[in-house]
Image (spheres, rainbow, N blue to C red):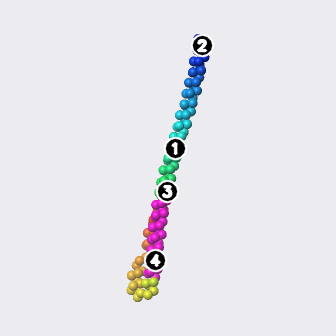
Amino acid sequence: MDAPAGTTQTHSLNRDIGATMAEILQSVRQVNEIVAEITAASEEQSIGIEQVGQTIVQMDEATQLCRMNSQFTSFNLAVSRVAPSGDREVSARFSLRSNCSRAASISVM
């Protein structure tokens, strides 16, 4: 016995609707994957920006330390030119090398 024409059209329509729904679900999954990738990339970018900020702060600290060392060295040089020899020994104890090694130890990420 053959199915009536209306029933055949209904089955065909249901099959088409099912295929369309499967395509929509697949597209939604792909969009979800893309959104997850964008989220992960944004988090990585935020971490990178934070690291750059920390590095800039460390570079600024090293620059300030070197500036202070330079000023201190200039001061010691001026003192050594005008001070008696005993005072030169006191000022010579402060070494630019020890202060610069501290500045150099600041790690850059």
Amino acid type at circle 4 is Gln
Q: Which residue corresponds to mark 4? A: 71
Return the residue at label 2: 2
Determine contact: label 3, label 4, CB under 8 Å.
no
Q: Are marks 1 and 4 in contact (CB under 8 Å)?
A: no
Tag in front: 3 or 2 = 2
**How many neighbours does mark 1 have within 10 angstroms: few (below 14), some (14-19), or many (20 or more)?**
few
Specify the principal SS of the magenta part.
helix
Residue 94 spot, x, y in % from top left: 41, 77
Task: Give the residues drawn in magenta, as a range.
Answer: 52-77
Tell me if residue 6 is in the magenta stretch: no
Which badge, 1 or 2, is on the more N-terminal residue?
2
Q: Which residue is mark 3?
A: 49
Q: Amino acid at mark 1?
A: Val
Dot 1 or dot 4: first in sequence order is 1
Above/below status of 48 relative to 13: below
Q: Is residue 65 above or below residue 88?
A: above
Task: Name which residue lies at 56% across and 24% down.
Answer: 14
Q: Looking at the picture, how far across and down is residue 34, in whole percent?
A: 53, 43
